[in-house]
Image (cartoon, rainbow, N blue to C red):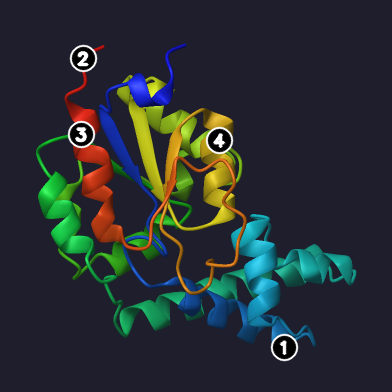
């Protein structure tokens, strides 16, 4: 197989939460609040470790304390409702995202591959205006296992006829990078304040700003292969 640097990019994939929109803090708050009802203190640092680094569910903490599956299911449903309520109050598009997408739109096929439930994704983007830039979207209901499993990315490639070496995905977390590496896809990481202390070994690039993405991607759209 040719080296990544020798391969043209045909598809640019994007994570959603923490890359396009500032929603991770809201998800943390909703999860923390419902877990507190059964005496579990989910700190921000613990959330980062479990969810953003390891890609596990914070409800594993309840399982470890022998909380019944029935109660966990109820808590998860309550968390999803609380998260929806927080999202409906307004979602902030991260700085530089719209301008970045404008620069890339029409030059490369772009899709969102997210672990968000479809319901939450639709609430998030009800007023962002960002979906006009994307050719397809995959949400949590579209594949079997979530990141850090590579299934979301493998599903995106299978449905669209991509090869791994012709793709790049933009992520913000270790779990996203782990999924990309397992799928054989180049991963550009743009850390947030929640993920900046993570281990991004193996990333194709680690950038300081989303606005640096076009500089990395545009030269790869016209390589001779």
Quadrant where the C terminus sits is top left
Residue matched to label 1: 37
Q: Is residue 146 visible?
A: no
For marks 2 and 3 on the same chain, the one whose residue lies earlier in the sequence: 3
For marks 4 and 1 on the same chain, the one whose residue lies earlier in the sequence: 1
Q: Position of residue 193 (x, y in %)?
A: 48, 74
Identify which residue, 103 or 26, lies in the foreground: 103
Camera-side mark, 1 or 2: 2
Identify which residue, 109 or 36, lies in the foreground: 109
Residue matched to label 4: 181
Residue matched to label 3: 219
Residue at 58%, 70% (x, y): give it: 77
The quadrant where residue 208 appears: bottom left
The quadrant where residue 130 appears: bottom left
Residue at 21%, 14% (x, y): give it: 224
Q: State if disc 4 and disc 2 touch (CB < 8 Å).
A: no
Q: State if disc 4 and disc 3 touch (CB < 8 Å).
A: no
Q: State if disc 2 and disc 1 touch (CB < 8 Å).
A: no
Q: Position of residue 100 (x, y in %)?
A: 18, 56
Residue matched to label 2: 224
For marks 1 and 2 on the same chain, the one whose residue lies earlier in the sequence: 1
- Disc 2 from disc 4: Cα separation: 24 Å
Q: Callout 3: helix, strand or loop?
A: helix
Q: Is residue 187 left or right of residue 72?
A: left
Q: Callout 4: helix, strand or loop?
A: helix
Mark carried by residue 114: none
């Amino acid at each position: 197989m040719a080296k990544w640097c020798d391969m043209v990019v045909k598809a640019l994939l994007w994570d959603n939460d923490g890359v396009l929109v500032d929603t991770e803090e809201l998800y943390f708050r909703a999860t923390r609040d419902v877990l507190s009802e059964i005496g579990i203190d989910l700190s921000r640092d613990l959330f980062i470790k479990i969810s953003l680094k390891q890609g596990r569910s914070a409800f594993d903490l309840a399982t470890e304390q022998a909380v019944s599956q029935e109660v966990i299911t109820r808590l998860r449903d309550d968390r999803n409702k609380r998260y929806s309520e927080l999202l409906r109050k307004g979602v902030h598009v991260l700085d530089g995202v719209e301008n970045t997408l404008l620069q890339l739109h029409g030059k490369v096929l772009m899709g969102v591959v997210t672990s968000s439930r479809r319901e939450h994704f639709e609430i998030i983007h009800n007023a962002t205006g960002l979906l006009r830039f994307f050719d397809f979207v995959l949400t949590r209901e579209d594949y079997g296992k979530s990141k850090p499993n590579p299934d979301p990315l493998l599903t995106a490639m299978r449905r669209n006829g991509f090869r791994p070496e012709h793709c790049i995905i933009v992520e913000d977390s270790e779990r996203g990078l782990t999924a990309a590496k397992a799928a054989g896809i180049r991963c550009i990481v743009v850390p947030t304040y929640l993920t900046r202390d993570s281990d991004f070994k193996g990333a194709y690039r680690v950038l300081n700003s989303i606005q640096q993405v076009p500089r990395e991607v545009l030269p790869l759209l016209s390589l001779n292969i």
